[in-house]
Image: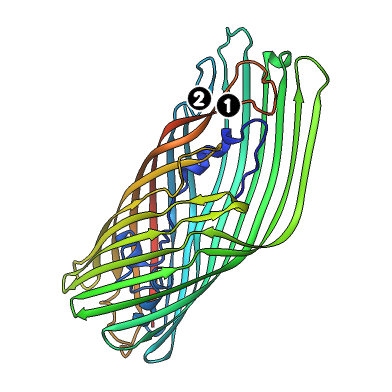
Amino acid sequence: MRRAAGVMAIALVVIPGVVAARNDDQVVAGTDVALTGGAVVANVHTGGALWYNPAGVARLDSRSVTLSGALLDYSIVHAPGVLSTESGEQSAGDYSDLHVVPRALAFVLAPKPSLRWGIGLFFSRSFSRYVQDSVSTAANASEPAEFFASSNERKFVYHLSSAVAWKKSKKLLVGGGLDIVFASQRLSESIAGSYNQGQGGALSLDLNESISGGGLQMKAGIQWAPIEELRIGWMVATPSYLAFLSHKSTTTQTSAPPTGAPEFSGSQIDEVNGAWAGVEAGLTRFGLAYLGTWGWIEGDVVVNFPLRTAQLDVDWRTTADVQLGGVFKVTNHLQLGCGFFTDFSPEPTPNHFAETQVNFYGLTVGADFANRAEPSDTTKDGFYLALALAFRYAHGTGTLAGVTFPTAYPSPSTEPAELNLVRVKVDELSINLAFKAAF
């Protein structure tokens, strides 16, 4: 969401968190999704159908529940020189982040034998971090300078999803869904810097900002099986549009030039406005799955459409990603899965503080344990219980808009830094857990 600009180039603390965030909307919303890395649009068979292809809801058990989430999500960011000075000093640019992320909870019911209805709660974006950093000139500099910054940021986008799917025949399933979307961002930052221990001037900035809103997203999809072993899936989703925005922020800025009187300025915003603001891009998924007694394999292509929202500083281009995955039957109680995926950034070349362009490549491996073979119909008695544990690794490289600070008090003080594009590397490791129960 929108990030307020500040006199000290707030990218000092914002950049590491933005780099670590993923580009895509991957949600670990079921055992099949966890094992294949998201390659499920043609053959989804858990509550993840509400997210990946609503037509798949028609294939689910008449009564089932799916719960999934990230037990562990750990990111390491390496961006040397993201903070620098004109005299050549650089920050190491090494950061790490660890958090637990709940991802999805879905229920499915069957009003009629050929009709399924599902409802779920999905966290498509969940991000929380605390970062602090500093950079200073050499001790023997003619006018030494040092800067300190801290930031505490939380971002959430979550969906209350509902879908209805119809089993038109054994070969054709159709479905559609409507999501109620909520989004919020909270940001607190404090930045301070001085030249020659304050005798050459000093600057400080404090920012507290909260932006939130609610809106809608629509989805539709089909699954078609021209032959028993082959399944074709397609879905499309509109952008998530927020119908209103609540924006609250306070900013205070103090500058003490080496000569002249200190200056103070501040601003405050507290408003709620109607809007039609896109917070997530529209997309389409197309997949082919091949099934056998040994399991199944699938390949998907995911296209994210461009999105521009001035109120939220969103300017995303079209991207196309590939997801390949398979689930292989070892016994009636054990399945193994693996997957490969790409995750390309929709961002243009960074031209503002804190913007990034990072492309990811990743792998998933995991196992699914069940109390018995998955039921093929709704007449069997007893519970079906399945638990999947999967590991996800992604490596990303790209560019980042860092900042270079002058070695003397800037004049004017409102332009204290210049953009400096640097290379960045990101490594992410997640441990995902998914649970399914049918009865």
Instruction: Give percent across and percent down for residue 117.
Output: 45, 83
Q: In what element is the residue under mark 1?
A: strand
Q: Which mark is residue 81?
A: none
Given residues 360 and 293, the one toward you in this image is 360
Q: Residue at x 50, y 22 (%)?
A: 90
Q: Is residue 77 visible?
A: yes
274 is higher (above) or lower (below) than 341: below
Residue 66, by quadrant, is bottom left
Given residues 171 and 426, the one toward you in this image is 171
Given residues 327 and 90, the one toward you in this image is 90
Q: Which residue is mark 2?
A: 91
Q: Image check: 164 left or right of 381?
A: right
Give how far apart the Cα atoms at labels 2 and 1 are. Answer: 8 Å
Q: Residue furthest bottom?
A: 112
N-term mark: 2 or 1 = 2
* Circle 2/circle 1 CB separation < 8 Å: yes
Amino acid type indicated by mark 2: Ser
Q: Residue at x 18, y 76 (%)?
A: 229
Q: Quadrant of the C terminus?
A: bottom left
Q: Residues within 10 Å of mark 2 (few under 14, many from 20)?
A: some
Given residues 321 and 145, the one toward you in this image is 321
Instruction: Give percent across and percent down for residue 45.
Output: 33, 74
Q: Which residue is mark 1?
A: 134
Q: Image check: 102 left or right of 45?
A: right
Instruction: Give percent across and percent down for residue 9.
Output: 61, 32
Q: Residues within 10 Å of mark 1 (few under 14, many from 20)?
A: some
Q: Is residue 43 visible?
A: no
Q: In what element is the residue under mark 2?
A: loop
Q: Residue furthest right?
A: 261
Amino acid type indicated by mark 1: Ser
379 is higher (above) or lower (below) than 76: below
The colour scheme used here is rainbow
